[in-house]
Image: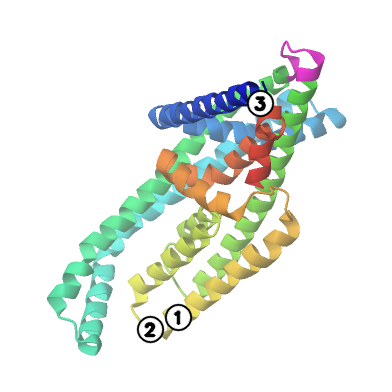
Amino acid sequence: MIKKPNLFMKQNKVVNASIVFIAVILLIFVLKTFQVFLRPFTIAIIITLSLIPLFRISEKYRIPKSIMFLVLILVLLFVFHLASLLVTVESRKIDEKLPEYQKTINEGIDFITLTGGISRKQLGDLIDPKRITHYINSFIKGVASLITEIFVAILFSIFLIPSHKKLFNLQLNRSQKKRFKSALNAVEKSIRDYLYVKTTISIGTALVSAVVLYFFKVDFILVLALIIFLLNFIPNLGSIIAVGIAVGAYLLKFGIGFGSLWLLGILILIQVIFGNILEPKFAGTKLKLSPVLILLSLFLWYWIWGIIGVILAIPLMSIIKIIFEHIESTKNIARFMS
């Protein structure tokens, strides 16, 4: 008599697990298929959640919402315009400096062949100047594409920000409304805290790195600072890639030498100070996400949405975890994510 209910419960668990698995597969399919629309829309939601406290401040000091809204949109558009103008101007300079870079690369190939005993043809095929400069142009175009997507997200935010209060007026019973409001407030706080700390740390890292690059007379300092700022939103891997790109820019201009080693050491030190010392001190353990989960989520979201998915991976996993915490049947999953 006792075995039948147990068997029935086991069958229910299998059915529920199957439904969840199918739902996840369908969700990933939808995210990949409609990523052109969903990526900027997701960025817009995160921007909206981070800006809501400013509207609360405006209510407290009786600043008209229309003025606050207009100022925020103008600031966002100005920052976007400045970034896009910077990328456009700097990408044109690359074509002008192309012969200089090709000469430096050829000199580097000659140096390696003389000291390393490698044939020039083999090394020339591996380090092709035209291919390297093509990769640089492609990378800058990728940054420009990211900025364009952020602009689309700002346009979405224009419609989302005025209507954010309507979320609290959904037709739900008292218990559901309380849980929904609690989840929404938790999501807002988590995203706000993460973005404020991460943005401050990334700006600091980019500015100090830009000063160092200026003293080392590296080209395209502002674009490199922008790239360092963006890549710092990618945990662990982003800082490594940022340092690699900055040192690569130095090598393109000056070639191989002790200067590149000094620059590498200083940039790594900057990343360690801001990323490993200052950021944990300010951020603490607010997100409470497992390091293994963070690493896996980076690969998952890169596969789904590319580089933008990697940048959004941590906020998205934080939102998913908070939602799971407020649903009775998924609380165990939320604990596993911590």
The structure residue drawn at horizontal position 24% and vertical position 86%, both measured from the top left corner, is 116
Q: Position of residue 292 (x, y in %)?
A: 56, 54
Identify the residue under disc 3.
161
Answer above or below: position of 296 versus 171. below
Q: Position of residue 137 (x, y in %)?
A: 32, 54
Give the quadrant of residue 306.
top left
- Seen from the viewer's position, the closer of residues 232 and 84 is 232
- Pointer 2 with pointer 3, Cβ within 8 A: no
From the image, which quarter does the N terminus lie in? top right
- Seen from the viewer's position, the closer of residues 100 and 15 is 15
What separation in Å lies between label 1 and label 2 (alpha carbons)?
A: 7 Å
- Pointer 1 with pointer 2, Cβ within 8 A: yes
- Seen from the viewer's position, the closer of residues 256 and 329 is 329
For the residue marked with disc 2, what is the amino acid? Gly
Give the quadrant of residue 217.
bottom left
Q: Which residues are magenta?
A: 168-176
Provide the secondary structure element on which disc 1 rests. Answer: helix
Looking at this rendering, what residue extends furthest in the top direction?
A: 171
Give the quadrant of residue 71.
top right
Query: Residue 175: within the magenta?
Result: yes
Q: Tag 1 or tag 3, which sits nearer the N-term?
A: 3
Provide the secondary structure element on which disc 3 rests. Answer: helix
For the residue marked with disc 3, what is the amino acid? Ile
Identify the residue under disc 1.
261
Identify the residue under disc 2.
257
Answer above or below: position of 220 versus 324. below
Answer above or below: position of 60 versus 266. above
> In the displayed structure, does residue 120 sit left or right of residue 212?
left
The structure residue drawn at horizontal position 72% and vertical position 54%, both measured from the top left corner, is 283
